[in-house]
Amino acid sequence: MLRALPSNQWNYTTAAHLLNRAGFGGPPAEIQKLVDMGLEKAVDHLLDFESDAKPNADPEWAKPDPERFKRLRDMRDADPEKRKELQRMQQREQRERVQDLRQWWLERMVSGKRPLQEKLTLFWHGHFATSVQKVKDGYLMWKQNDIFRRNAAGNWQVMLEQVSKDPAMLIWLDQAQSRREHPNENFAREVMELFVLGEGNYTERDVTEAARALTGWSIERGTQEFVFRAAAHDRGNKFILGKLGAFTGEDVLKLISSQPQAARFITAKLWRFFAEDNPPKEMVDTLAAVFTAEKQEFKPLLKTMFMCDAFYAPGVIRNQVKSPVQWLVSSVRLLERDLPPPMVTSNALRTLGQELFAPPNVKGWDGGLAWITTNNLLSRYNMSAFLVLGENPMLPPPGKDKKPRPRQRPFRPGGPTDVTKLFKEEERATKPRLVEALERRFIQGHLKDKQRAALIDYLDNQGALNQETILHAIRLVMSTPEFQLT
């Protein structure tokens, strides 16, 4: 079921597919570098990200706040009017931090040297979906994001325990308030249903008993760290997943993740994220067997996935709708330009339907065809023009006085894309060569006949291949159905 891809099928198309799925795509030179490595070395190059270049520095504010105790005390002791002012200042600071955090992560995706690590971090962000709208703390969201990144391709049990004790998660699923007198079942339910086993693979009693075992897990408000409050923990016997004992929270996580269904659930979800929807049962069983044999380590599992011929099947390549984050990051990388300013990227991703650190609910984003609506497609086309042409089509045209409309601030992406960076002189010499170069860079294959004919028709109606003509040709390619797929 998991045969290695034959060496004679390792080429520009399959290498581009690997870079698209195990990262965020890239220009032809990066793809060709993987082709020249050969399949196994290319996979190892992406997987062994810890040995790669030093990653981007953390945000300046992403560290414990030594003044936190004092600020909490000052807010508690302030009169009502002063307390409101301090709260407004804190809220403004948190909004700025979250916007900074979003841009920081996007920069890592665009220019970092560890694409698979960031792609996995994005996977875990969707899997353990946690929203800043409830957590209300940029530092805690960064801490969780850092857990995802450090454990991205590590051990499942280690990841699960660290995320379960993460302050943002404890707030998000109300675990911090769970006491033996009144166990809160939110986290116990979601860890079984959404994180480890899937719906239908546990009972209501399992949830109730697991919630008892997890009591006492909380947060130290001043240090913003996990704390176990022994006095709040239920020390009695619990009956969970067919076993009886005075289980602790750690015991519960081990019990859940040791179920045979646990391996099938997480490996199937990884295959859906990286390869295709609806994997056959035989595929899931095989992946689960590999994962179990490797003691729930993700790196060997991922290598098996990225090496197998099923990952490169014709029905898998360029048959996945790009998420808004994948679309934005890959577009910037293919255009070889800088990421737009933070407010632009935040607004764009919100409009496109994937606002980082703000998933719609505990299930995360639906993905797939849910990314494609009439409004979202129009926003993609407008953002393409913004990135390619250096214009902001999202703003209405100026009024008769030629001034921008009120409350609209025209952002500049730094001028139009430099086509001389994207295409060699010989690729810009004739229209047929330009069409081939456009397809190679942006589609890594061929446009459908209808889209290719429209592109050729556009070029035939233009004069010489100047910068403006080529820029509009790029925008046309980025507006095709093929470009929305990866």
Image (spheres, rainbow, N blue to C red):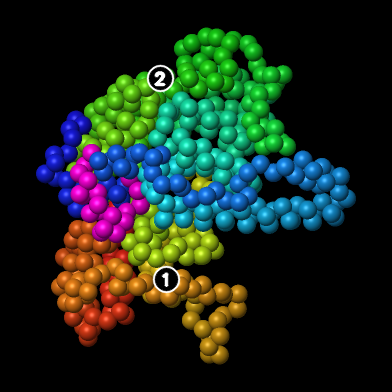
Vertical comparison of 350 with 315: above or below: below
- Are discs 2 and 1 less than 8 Å apart at CB? no
Q: Give the structural element (helix, strand or loop) at label 1.
A: helix
Would residue 23 be visible to someone looking at this image?
A: yes
Vertical comparison of 403 with 148: above or below: below
User: What's the residue type where badge 1 is placed?
Assistant: Phe
Q: Is residue 363 left or right of residue 317?
A: right
Vertical comparison of 296 with 397: above or below: above
Vertical comparison of 451 with 223: above or below: below
Of residues 182 and 331, the one drawn nearer to the viewer in this rendering = 331
Q: Residue at x 28, y 65 (%)?
A: 480
Dividing the picture into quadrants, the one containing residue 223 is top right
User: What's the residue type where badge 2 is placed?
Assistant: Gln
The residue labelled by disc 1 is 386
Q: Which residues are magenta?
A: 22-40
Q: Is residue 454 left or right of residue 320?
A: left
**Image location of residue 456, percent across then percent down:** 18, 74
Q: Nearer the viewer, mark 2 or mark 1?
A: 1
**Image location of residue 408, percent across then percent down:** 57, 75
The residue labelled by disc 2 is 259
**Image location of residue 103, percent across then percent down:** 51, 56
Q: Give the structural element (helix, strand or loop) at label 2.
A: loop
If the image is split into quadrants, where does the N terminus sit?
top left
Of residues 372 and 247, the one drawn nearer to the viewer in this rendering = 247
Q: Residue at x 46, y 54 (%)?
A: 106
Who comes first in sequence, dot 2 or dot 1? 2
